Image: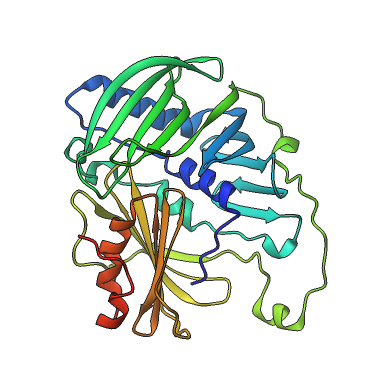
Amino acid sequence: MNIKVLNKPLAGVLLSLWALGPALANDQDPSVREWLDRMALAVETLDYRGTLVQIRGGQMNAFEVMRRVDEGVVQERVYALNGPAQEWVRDDDQYRSTLSGSPRDWYQADLQNRLMAHQPLDQLADLASAYELRLGGTDRVAGLRAQRIDIWPKDQFRYAQRLWLDTQTGMWLRSMVLDRNGRVLQEQGFVQLELGATVMDSDLAPKTEVVETPTTQAEEQSGPASAPAQISGMLRPLWAPQRLPAHFQLINARHGRSEVDSAFDHLLFSDGLTSFSIYIDHAPRQAMPTRLSAMGPLHILSGMMGQRQFTIMGQVPAQTIQFIGRQFLSSAETKSEVMDGP
């Protein structure tokens, strides 16, 4: 399947916000568990509007973020305040994004939300087995008093994180992603936040001007570019890695057909805090070289498995993606193209 990645700064923000879904800390210190449970509830139930800043690779990007939750239905809009005019809009389980007003850049897909929003928390690994979780001090973020939580990995397969949570609601305010040596890979947080804000329909409507362009005959035959992927229920994956880094588990698997009617599987693995996905396209494709790329802490590995194309992606170190990728590569010659790892 053709994995669509947005403009890099906006993609990083959205992937980080998706990762703020439910997390369960079966930690010995009940206060850490309580803070993470409060965060999981707050980010899924609170209405808010604010300005979020992301710093990565020496570059700063700012975003206007609005969210409204009505009877469990989430509506959200993220708009880039600098760089190309880009925005992302969510309405329940449908997503659309646009860059510089081009209608061909609009798409809809409910796959990510369906996989991430219903993680079976009771089946996830104990976070304390994979991480050291500690309460830090308190600070001020966006004018609010915040509790810091330090999360340090016990191996090389995941990143360290620092979280700052609002002391009143548990709402996520700021976070850092760090490597095992403590080097900051990415930092983002609100510089202005109004919790409990009244978010109107007009606030959530797309603001980027869309310029209509003629549709070609080929595009008409292949269907509209905004057609959502069709997703079936849970499946028993036919193509899954035989070995996983410690504490990661398969928590969801889906089968679907893309907007160009290409069949694919999507497998989601998580340790309870960090996750990575594997997409496997069942349609024969022209041979493509193995390629490892990075967007800050996000790593993406794509290649061929016989006549199938696979893509592995997640906010995890490169060696985690490589560990999985070597199991999918179809020949020793191809394997040599991926950097050595554990």
Question: What residue lies at 25% left-to-right and 81% top-to-bottom?
Answer: 332
Instruction: Specify the quadrant of the image occupied by residue 303.
Output: bottom left
Q: Position of residue 104 (x, y in %)?
A: 71, 65
Q: Nearer the viewer, residue 231 or 164?
A: 164
Q: Nearer the viewer, residue 138 or 259?
A: 138
The answer to whether 83 is drawn above or below residue 304 in the figure is above
Question: What residue lies at 63% left-to-right and 54% top-to-bottom?
Answer: 96
Q: Position of residue 49 (x, y in %)?
A: 63, 29
Question: What residue lies at 24% left-to-right and 41% top-to-bottom?
Answer: 122
Q: Is residue 294 left or right of residue 276?
A: right
Image quarter in which the C terminus is found: bottom left
The answer to whether 235 is drawn above or below residue 274 in the figure is below
Q: Is residue 37 left or right of residue 125?
A: right
Q: Nearer the viewer, residue 198 or 304?
A: 304
Question: What residue lies at 44% left-to-right and 15% top-to-bottom?
Answer: 139
Q: Position of residue 216 (x, y in %)?
A: 77, 79
The answer to whether 13 is drawn above or below residue 66 in the figure is below
Instruction: Specify the quadrant of the image occupied by residue 256.
Output: bottom left
Does residue 310 appear anywhere in the picture? no
The answer to whether 259 is drawn above or below residue 246 in the figure is below
Q: Is residue 342 left or right of residue 100?
A: left
